[in-house]
Image: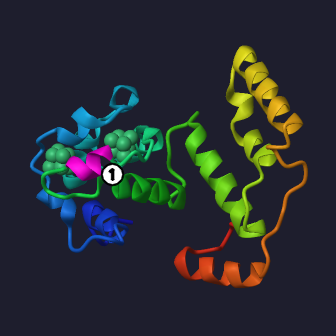
Amino acid sequence: MTDTIPFSQEISNLLHASEGEPLKNCIQCGTCSGTCPVAGYMDNSPRQIIALINLGKKDQVLESNTFWYCASCYHCSVRCPQEIDITELMYALKRYSIWKNRYQEGLIGPTFSEAFVKMIIRGGRSFEPILATSYIFSFNTREFLQEIQGATELLLKGRLPILPARIKRLENFRRMIGRIIPMGGLE
Ligand code: SF4
Ligand code: SF4
């Protein structure tokens, strides 16, 4: 089945704080890529991702690690001469990628994000010991032991909870979240 609306329009519809199709205003100046601290680790720079979206290259965009490597530092957004909120675009691409269940294999980001959202929906709070299981086993032995050592030190200092906590009036919170994101499959 062919898509009913262009990919660039689909993505623009997810940029809730922007109007119209802001990505079409990109002049490909490269300021965002030049200012991005993690561009060197990305398959496609922020500038390239925007070009690919505007060209309708959906497969290439979803196969890219770009938005999963974004550190949400907002450098690109504040420096873009066209006032494009590139950070928001990176969040939108993460949401779209999880929604469509299409992302590069081996990335920690999608598993981590899904685990985090489910945890927040269930209890209203993050609980690091459970969250850590979504990425800690992807580390090598040395990194794994470093993480365990760090967690033990935090635990001994009382900075890591032993049991998960729940917020008060959780049902109200869940109703509010349900108005923002589709809850199906996340509860
Ligand atoms: S800084 Fe803005 S206009 Fe320049 S390439 Fe990036 S998104 Fe496009
Ligand atoms: S918000 Fe993301 S894409 Fe933009 S400069 Fe920071 S890390 Fe790079």
**Please, what secondary structure does the residue beneath circle 1 have?**
helix
* Image coords of residue 3 (percent x, y): 33, 66
Toward the front, the furthest residue is 157
Q: Residue at x 81, y 24 (%)?
A: 149
Q: Residue at x 68, y 68 (%)?
A: 185
Mark 1 C-beta closer than 8 Å to ligand 1: no
* Image coords of residue 103 (percent x, y): 50, 45
Q: Residue at x 84, y 62 (%)?
A: 165
> Looking at the figure, which quarter contains the C terminus?
bottom right
- Residue 60, visible in the rendered structure: no
Hey, which quadrant is residue 7 in on the image? Answer: bottom left
Q: Does 82 appear above or below 132?
A: below
Q: Residue at x 47, y 53 (%)?
A: 94
Reply yes or no: does residue 77 show up in magenta: yes
Q: Is residue 99 left or right of residue 174?
A: left
* Image coords of residue 6 (percent x, y): 26, 65
Q: Is residue 170 left or right of residue 11?
A: right
| Residue indicated by mark 1 | 58
* Image coords of residue 27 (percent x, y): 9, 49
Q: Amino acid at mark 1?
A: Lys
Reply yes or no: does residue 172 show up in magenta: no
Ligand 2, what quadrant? top left
- Residue 137, visible in the rendered structure: yes
Tally of numbered discs: 1
First to last magenta residue range: 75-79
Q: Does 47 appear above or below 93?
A: above
Q: Is residue 126 left or right of residue 97?
A: right
Q: Does 120 appear above or below 115?
A: below
Hey, which quadrant is residue 166 in on the image? Answer: bottom right
Q: Is residue 70 left or right of residue 168?
A: left
> Looking at the figure, which quarter contains the N terminus?
bottom left
- Front-most of 44 and 157? 157
